[in-house]
Image: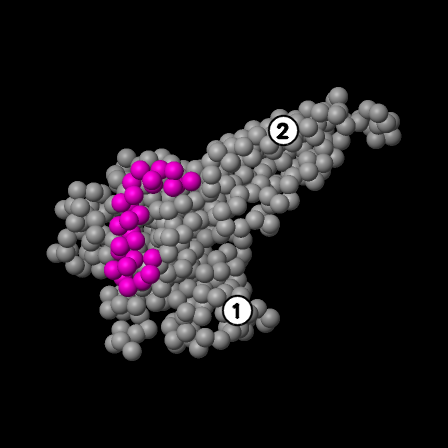
């Protein structure tokens, strides 16, 4: 056994206590975003953590740290030719309770089932969460079972802050100019909607919002939203024969005709899907909202055309019915753009190897802030933080995986300084 066990490397062992303490501090702050809010940020409480991060950065000596239009912005000077940005999001999902988080540190985890005193019947098992097996002998953090943990993405925030602390304390080591950015509202799809890329001033970037240690994700879904609006004919139901056209029934026919083999619950890996997620209306008009996803943008666009024809065919038999379909681009597969800058992912792979880990080239069945940043011209793959079972009461992360994430950032920065 090495003298830095259970950590992967001496650097990770050095960073471990700092990343642990930061994470335990950050997760106690409620930063849930609100998908129904029209404000930005969608909840004011996200800024509680943002202001704390600004204070901590300034205490580290990062004097330009500031809160700007909802974003934490900061920089470290460097001598390299490429400006590199590191990003993570402060908000947590609304899919599970997020207030009153009570993190539970399980030191020297024994490899067995984890139970929750505050939630009898809730069980975190290595059978259902296979990545837990690799954590035997390590320090696992989960919840008391009544809330999410918030590792998504406070593990990323803690890893970046820990790496910045280390880099600032070792300012004599070569590094490129760095930009630090903590975003709000990633969980509601608005993470970079107000971000000024000119103010960020980076040429390449990395989000710290991934899962299993060693993973780099440089491929994501291409994504569209589809809005289908059926218009019918309202009449008094007592005299409706041969007159009424119920838009609710049209919507039902359309939903029933959607190919079940292309649903989220029947697809995996690189298969795309169509997912109806919202319906509202009455007899006279019904509006459906769907998301369309695929890794191949051409296949995505063809799926949109097929769904449009299906909606039109649903309304066609009814003289007094009509349908309006609108498809809006949300983001595109980051791989479409990252192919033009292979060194961005390549340097990250080498940094993961230098940290003592086996790189895992992954893809995201979803999107990140990096997907949208890449589409806007800032190449931004996604790196691991160690978070698991996110958006659930069983969310967990290990101290050692977060330390590996912070160590990878340090090696990544040093690698860019050599270019």
> Looking at this view, is 351 or 376 the one in front?
351
- Label 2, residues with CA under 10 Å away: few <14, some 14-19, many ≥20: few
Whether residue 350 is in magenta: the answer is yes
Residues drawn in magenta: 333-359
Residue 114 position, x and y percent, is 50, 73
- Within the image, what quadrant is residue 20 found in? bottom left
| Residue beneath the point at 26% across and 41% down | 202
Q: Nearer the viewer, residue 240 or 221?
A: 221
Q: Which x, y percent locates residue 399?
A: 36, 67
Left or right for 44, reference 289: left
Tell whether 68 sits left or right of 228. Answer: left
Asked if 274 appears above or below 328 in the picture, the reply is: below
Residue bearing mark 2: 309
Tell which of 75 and 294 is nearer to you. Answer: 294
In the rendered image, residue 126, in percent from the top left (x then y), is placed at: 50, 69
Residue at the disc numbered 1:
127
């Amino acid at each position: 056994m090495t003298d830095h066990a259970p950590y992967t490397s001496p650097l990770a062992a050095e960073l471990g206590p700092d990343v642990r303490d930061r994470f335990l501090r950050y997760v106690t702050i409620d930063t849930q975003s609100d998908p129904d809010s029209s404000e930005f940020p969608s909840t004011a409480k996200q800024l509680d953590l943002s202001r704390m991060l600004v204070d901590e950065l300034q205490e580290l000596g990062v004097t330009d740290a500031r809160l700007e239009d909802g974003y934490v912005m900061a920089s470290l000077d460097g001598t390299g030719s490429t400006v590199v940005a590191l990003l993570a999001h402060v908000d947590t999902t609304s899919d599970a309770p997020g207030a009153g988080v009570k993190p539970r540190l399980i030191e020297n985890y024994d490899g067995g089932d984890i139970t929750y005193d505050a939630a009898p019947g809730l069980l975190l098992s290595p059978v259902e969460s296979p990545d837990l097996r690799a954590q035997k002998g390590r320090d696992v953090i989960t919840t008391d079972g009544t809330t999410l943990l918030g590792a998504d993405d406070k593990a990323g925030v803690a890893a970046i802050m820990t790496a910045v602390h280390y880099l600032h304390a070792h300012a004599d080591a070569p590094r490129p100019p760095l930009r630090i950015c903590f975003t709000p509202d990633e969980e509601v799809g608005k993470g970079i909607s107000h971000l000024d890329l000119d103010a960020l001033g980076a040429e390449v970037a990395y989000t710290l919002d991934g899962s299993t240690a060693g993973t780099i994700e440089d491929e994501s879904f291409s994504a569209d939203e589809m809005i289908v609006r059926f218009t019918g004919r309202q009449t008094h139901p007592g005299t409706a024969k041969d007159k009424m056209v119920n838009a609710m029934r049209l919507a039902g026919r359309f939903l029933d005709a959607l190919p079940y083999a292309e649903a989220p619950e029947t697809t995996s890996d690189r298969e795309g899907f169509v997912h109806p997620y919202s319906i509202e209306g009455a007899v006279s008009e019904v509006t459906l909202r769907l998301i369309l996803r695929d890794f191949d943008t051409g296949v995505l666009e063809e799926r949109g055309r097929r769904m449009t024809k299906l909606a039109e065919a649903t309304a066609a038999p009814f003289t007094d019915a009509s349908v309006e379909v609108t498809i809006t681009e949300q983001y595109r597969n980051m791989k479409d753009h990252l192919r033009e800058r292979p060194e961005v992912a390549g340097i990250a792979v080498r940094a993961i190897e230098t940290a003592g880990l086996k790189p895992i080239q992954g893809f995201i069945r979803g999107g990140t802030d990096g997907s949208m940043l890449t589409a806007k011209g800032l190449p931004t793959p996604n790196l691991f933080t160690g978070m698991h079972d996110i958006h659930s009461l069983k969310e967990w992360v290990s101290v050692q995986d977060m330390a590996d994430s912070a160590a990878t950032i340090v090696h990544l920065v040093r690698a860019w300084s050599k270019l």
